[in-house]
Image (tube, rainbow, N blue to C red):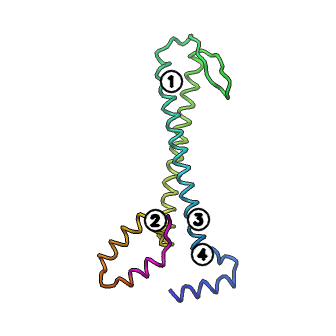
C-alpha cells in the first residue's frame, strides 16, 4: 500500500491526471452518488415509458374492434385532433414500437450503469449503510481472531448512506 501511495504521489507532480488516480473520499462519494442518481433516473424513465406503452396497448386493443371509419380524438402536442380510427391506429402502433425500443435501450444502459457502479464500488471499497453492517458481521465471524485487521480493511473503504 505504501509503495502505491508513493507512486501516486509522484504521478501528480509529473502529470495533471493525479486527481483520477487518487481522488479524496468526498470525491469518491460524490461520484458514486451521481452514478446512483443516474441509474435511478434511468429506472424512473423506463417505468414511465412502460406505463405509457401499457396505455398504448389498451387503446390499440380497444380500437381494433371499432369500425375504421368511426371518428376518434387524439391528443397531439396538447391539442385535441379529430381523426378516424384507421388514421390513428397505425400511428399508435408505431409509437408503441418506438417506446418499446427506447425501453430496451434504457434497460441496456441501466445494466451497463449497474456494472459500472459495481466496479466503482469494488475499486474504492464502498459500502452502503445497511450492507456495511452485514458485511462487518460476516467478516468478524470469518476472522474473529484478527478483528483489528478486519477493522483496518473496512476502515480503508468509503461508507455511503
Q: Measuring 55% from the left and 22% from the top, which residue is drawn there? A: 89
Residue sitting at 56 percent across and 50 percent down? 41
Label 2, on which residue? 128
Classify 10 Å Cα crowding around label 1: few (below 14), some (14-19), many (20 and above). some
Query: Mark 4 and mark 3: span between their CA atoms?
Result: 11 Å
Whole-Å distance between the Cαs marked 4 and 2?
18 Å
**Residue at 60% in and 15% down:** 84
Q: Who comes first in sequence, dot 2 or dot 1?
A: 1
Q: Which residues are magenta?
A: 150-161
C-alpha gap between disc 2 and disc 1: 43 Å
Rendered position, 88 above or below 110: above
Q: Give percent across and percent down for residue 34.
A: 58, 60
Q: Earlier in the sequence, mark 3 or mark 1?
A: 3
The answer to the question of whether label 3 and label 2 lie on touching residues, with beta carbons closer than 8 A, is no
Mark 3 to mark 1 CA distance (whole Å):
42 Å
Answer with mark 1 or mark 4, whichever residue precedes in sequence: 4
Q: Which residue is mark 3?
A: 31
Label placed on residue 24? 4
**Which dot marks residue 59?**
1
Q: Quadrant of residue 81?
A: top right
Q: Residues within 10 Å of mark 2 (few under 14, many from 20)?
A: few
| Label 3 secondary element | helix
Amino acid at each position: 500500500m505504501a509503495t502505491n501511495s508513493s507512486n501516486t504521489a509522484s504521478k501528480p507532480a509529473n502529470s495533471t491526471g493525479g486527481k483520477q488516480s487518487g481522488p479524496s473520499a468526498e470525491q469518491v462519494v460524490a461520484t458514486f452518488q451521481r452514478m446512483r442518481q443516474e441509474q435511478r433516473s434511468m429506472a424512473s424513465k423506463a417505468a414511465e415509458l412502460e406505463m405509457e406503452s401499457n396505455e398504448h396497448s389498451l387503446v390499440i386493443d380497444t380500437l381494433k374492434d371499432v369500425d375504421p371509419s368511426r371518428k376518434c380524438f387524439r391528443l397531439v402536442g396538447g391539442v385535441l385532433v379529430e381523426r378516424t380510427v384507421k388514421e390513428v391506429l397505425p400511428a399508435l402502433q408505431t409509437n408503441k414500437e418506438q417506446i418499446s425500443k427506447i425501453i430496451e435501450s434504457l434497460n441496456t444502459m441501466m445494466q451497463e450503469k449497474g456494472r459500472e457502479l459495481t466496479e466503482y464500488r469494488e475499486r474504492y471499497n464502498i459500502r452502503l449503510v445497511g450492507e456495511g453492517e452485514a458485511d462487518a458481521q460476516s467478516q468478524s465471524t470469518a476472522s474473529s481472531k484478527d478483528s483489528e485487521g478486519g477493522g483496518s480493511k473496512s476502515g480503508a473503504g468509503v461508507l455511503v448512506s
